[in-house]
Image (tube, grey):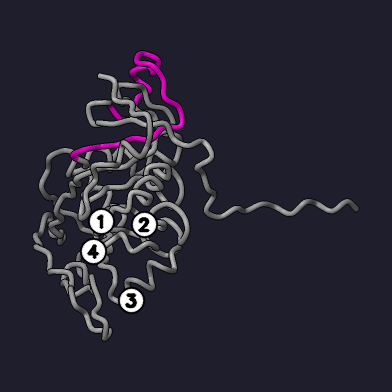
Amino acid sequence: MDKVLDSPDRAVEDIPDGATLAVGGFGLCGIPSTLLGALAAAGTSGLRVVSNNCGVDDWGLGLLLRAGRIARMTSSYVGENKEFARQYLSGELEVELTPQGTLAERLRAGGAGIPAFYTPAGAGTQVEEGGLPWRYAADGSVAVASPAKEVREFGGRRYLLEEAITADFALVRAEVADRHGNCVFHAAARNFNPLCATAGRITVVEADLVVEPGELPPDAVHLPGVYVDRVVAADPADRRIERRTVRPIPQEV
């Protein structure tokens, strides 16, 4: 089945207000920036987003956040986005902070049909006890707090029960995809992308290069096309470096 669409706008046009999105990438590495730009242009709002972070103030998910389109974030790291901090502390945004490994496993479990699992991450902390502020009220009080988690002991060690994550839509970016949706990711971009893809009920992939079926060696495929519903070509200019670091030019003696 040919899953390629002719534009990113078509690929996201049926994402409704209030949808849950699983969005791949880490920082600005491997984020589906072309699809996020199309979604920002579509005006979709009230989104409940699961992603490792929320981009930066003017790129990636930060575009949706700045426009007030995101109602809730489930993330493990949010330190590069000042607008994120402002909205959270002012009560405009609900935030569930989750340990990074736990977030990855919750997505993997959702894609594998596993409803929940036990992990030692967070045991003995407020993650276990509950009461972490998910949303503040306008007066600075806690309007919504995290619930306490179920605890069990295995081998004398405490473990917390964490529920799996699934999403209405998954937006991911691949280096190469064929027309059947088989995907290859580049280096560190193979981080949350495959996990988000499997956790989405409808998965949309943007790829730097779209090839014909059979061009990808089976052993090279990172994400089988059975998990992918739509493929679009990524804008080749749609890339950003989060922090450009270079060495100074040596001075001649």
Q: Secondary structure at mark 4?
A: loop
Circle 4 crowding by C-alpha within 10 Å: few under 14, some 14–19, many from 20: some
> What amino acid does circle 1 point to?
Leu
Q: How far separated are the C-alphas under marks 1 and 2?
A: 9 Å
| Percent x, y of residue 76 | 32, 59
> What amino acid does circle 3 point to?
Leu
Q: How far separated are the C-alphas under marks 2 and 4?
A: 30 Å
**Residue 36 painted magenta:** no
Sequence-wise, the earlier of marks 1 and 2 is 1
For the residues bearing labels 4 and 1, Cβ distance under 8 angstroms: no
Q: Nearer the viewer, mark 4 or mark 3?
A: 3
Q: How far separated are the C-alphas under marks 4 and 1?
A: 27 Å
Q: Nearer the viewer, mark 3 or mark 1?
A: 1
> Where is mark 3, residue-wise?
89
Q: Nearer the viewer, mark 3 or mark 2?
A: 2
Q: Considering only vertical position in the picture, is 10 above or below 146?
A: above
Q: Nearer the viewer, mark 2 or mark 4?
A: 2
> Where is mark 4, residue-wise?
122
Q: Secondary structure at mark 1?
A: strand
Q: Secondary structure at mark 2?
A: helix
> Where is mark 1, residue-wise?
47
Check residue 19 in the rendering and tell me which mark sits there, or answer none: none
For the residues bearing labels 1 and 2, Cβ distance under 8 angstroms: yes
| Percent x, y of residue 203 | 26, 37
